[in-house]
Image (tube, rainbow, N blue to C red):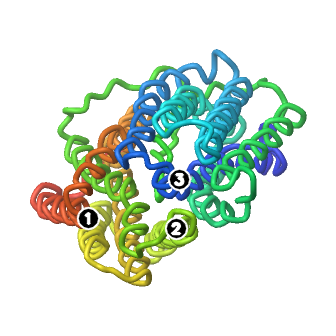
């Protein structure tokens, strides 16, 4: 890449900033259920750690997006990486102390929640800064290609994180060791960023977009930075309201399923915590791979409309989540969760593109922020609700999610009959 100063080396560095955070967070998601069980901590505490982090992320991401130009983009990237590194060290240190018997489970998870809040508060500074840095140094088709390639960093990280986390489990840190290793990788990326990425001297203003809380199979809102202030757009606007309703409801279903899947693997396979992590990682990787197959393969090949994507995505997600709650073998879990993830992999880009196409060009920045908020809001409460249902009955959160997605598909069929496209 060239243009206003975005070389291949610089893009690779920006890509790595996003990749290390996505990989580290999904690696943590694969480790935490087993660690929580090993420490004797209630499953609800595990979900609460991610819920609070998501709440802080949703609150702070718009703040950092608005400051991407005023504070300097490289400075915000440094802040975001520092937040990620600090969070991983605090969380890893607390979990290691608990696993070594140096602290009780309640204290460990209180510190862990604090560490996750650090990531929500400061880790959310990196994505909008990276997007704004790219947007200010590219134009036209080059900008589109660069931002599309950048978005794939989250998808790739959701596979890489759980895949390599088991390689970093070693004494005396045990299951907490991968968190410390990912913090070290973050330090290397931060050092390279400081040494190799030029400070901000953009040729044009480009505001950072609000990026949703990172999760498996997430699809970020379209990044369409533009000069000036974003056009005012309300959630109750009838053009985007049906798409946002679909996104928020479907997002709650996905967040609830993700919050419980690790515990289901442990309980269905009757595994001790020390041996559960690798199977949790395999199931999560299968889900992430299926989601990427949908987004990178099926969507371009089938050329489905946004309405078709949300409708068929909701139906697939419904079938997959119900099956996930009912099967008992590891292969059944892998296949069912992959089907559910493929459905969500179709659904999220569908509602994202549907909302984008429903408004004019001067409203794209506003709708991107709204879509990102719709993607992030479900992770505030849905994981904890999923765990609460799980404690009543193991299949309940998955059957409930499947029912929600089925009802949503019926609602979509009735309320999204015609494409909502605006040319300008």
Q: Position of residue 281 (x, y in %)?
A: 55, 66
Q: Earlier in the sequence, mark 3 or mark 1?
A: 3
Q: Disc 2 to disc 1, how far (Cα)?
A: 17 Å
Relative side of 336 to 106, left or right: left
Considering every residue shown, the one lying at the far left of the view is 414
Q: Position of residue 36 (x, y in %)?
A: 47, 50
Q: Residue at x 25, y 42 (%)?
A: 240
Q: Disc 3 to disc 1, how far (Cα)?
A: 19 Å
Relative side of 289 to 335, left or right: right
Which residue is tagged 2? Answer: 276
Q: Earlier in the sequence, mark 2 or mark 1?
A: 2
Q: Which quarter shows the C terminus?
A: top left
Nearest the viewer among 244 and 255 is 255
Q: Which mark is residue 61?
A: none
Q: Earlier in the sequence, mark 2 or mark 3?
A: 3
Which residue is tagged 3? Answer: 35
The vertical placement of 279 against 198, above or below, is below
Q: Position of residue 14 (x, y in %)?
A: 73, 43
Relative side of 342 to 395, left or right: right
Residues at discs 2 and 3 in contact (Cβ within 8 Å)? no
Q: Position of residue 327 (x, y in %)?
A: 30, 79
- Secondary structure of the residue carrying tag 2 is helix
Which residue is tagged 1? Answer: 394
Residue 424 seen in render: no
Relative side of 122 to 256, left or right: right
Nearest the viewer among 75 and 381 is 381
């Amino acid at each position: 890449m060239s243009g206003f100063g975005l070389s291949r080396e610089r893009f690779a560095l920006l890509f790595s900033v996003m990749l290390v955070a996505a990989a580290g967070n999904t690696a943590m998601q694969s480790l935490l259920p087993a660690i929580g069980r090993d420490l004797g901590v209630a499953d609800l505490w595990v979900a609460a750690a991610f819920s609070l982090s998501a709440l802080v992320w949703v609150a702070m991401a718009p703040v950092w997006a608005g400051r991407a130009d005023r504070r300097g983009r490289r400075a915000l990237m440094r802040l975001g990486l520092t937040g990620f590194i600090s969070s991983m060290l605090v969380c890893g240190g607390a979990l290691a102390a608990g696993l070594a018997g140096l602290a009780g489970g309640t204290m460990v998870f209180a510190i862990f929640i604090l560490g996750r809040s650090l990531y929500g508060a400061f880790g959310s500074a990196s994505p909008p800064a990276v997007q704004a840095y790219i947007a200010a140094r590219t134009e036209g088709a080059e900008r589109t290609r660069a931002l599309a390639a950048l978005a794939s960093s989250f998808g790739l990280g959701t596979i890489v994180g759980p895949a390599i986390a088991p390689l970093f489990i070693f004494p005396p840190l045990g299951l907490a060791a991968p968190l410390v290793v990912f913090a070290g990788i973050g330090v290397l990326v931060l050092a390279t960023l400081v040494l190799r990425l030029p400070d901000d001297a953009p040729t044009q203003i480009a505001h950072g977009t609000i990026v949703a809380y990172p999760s498996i199979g997430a699809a970020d809102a379209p990044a369409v930075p533009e000069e000036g202030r974003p056009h005012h757009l309300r959630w109750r606007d009838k053009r985007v309201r049906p798409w946002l309703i679909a996104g928020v409801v479907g997002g709650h279903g996905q967040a609830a399923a993700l919050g419980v899947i690790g515990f289901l693997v442990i309980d269905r396979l009757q595994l001790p915590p020390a041996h559960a992590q690798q199977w949790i990682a395999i199931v999560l990787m299968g889900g992430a791979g299926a989601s990427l197959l949908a987004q990178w393969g099926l969507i371009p090949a089938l050329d489905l409309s946004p309405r078709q994507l949300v409708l068929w995505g909701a139906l697939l997600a419904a079938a997959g989540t119900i099956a996930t709650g009912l099967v008992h073998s590891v292969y059944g879990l892998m296949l069912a969760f992959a089907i559910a993830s493929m459905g969500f992999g179709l659904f999220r880009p569908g509602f994202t593109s549907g909302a984008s196409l429903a408004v004019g060009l001067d409203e794209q920045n506003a709708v991107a922020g709204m879509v990102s908020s719709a993607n992030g809001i479900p992770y505030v409460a849905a994981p904890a609700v999923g765990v609460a249902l799980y404690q009543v009955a193991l299949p309940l959160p998955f059957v409930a999610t499947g029912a929600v997605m089925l009802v949503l598909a019926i609602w979509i069929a009735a309320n999204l009959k015609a494409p909502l496209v605006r040319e300008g």
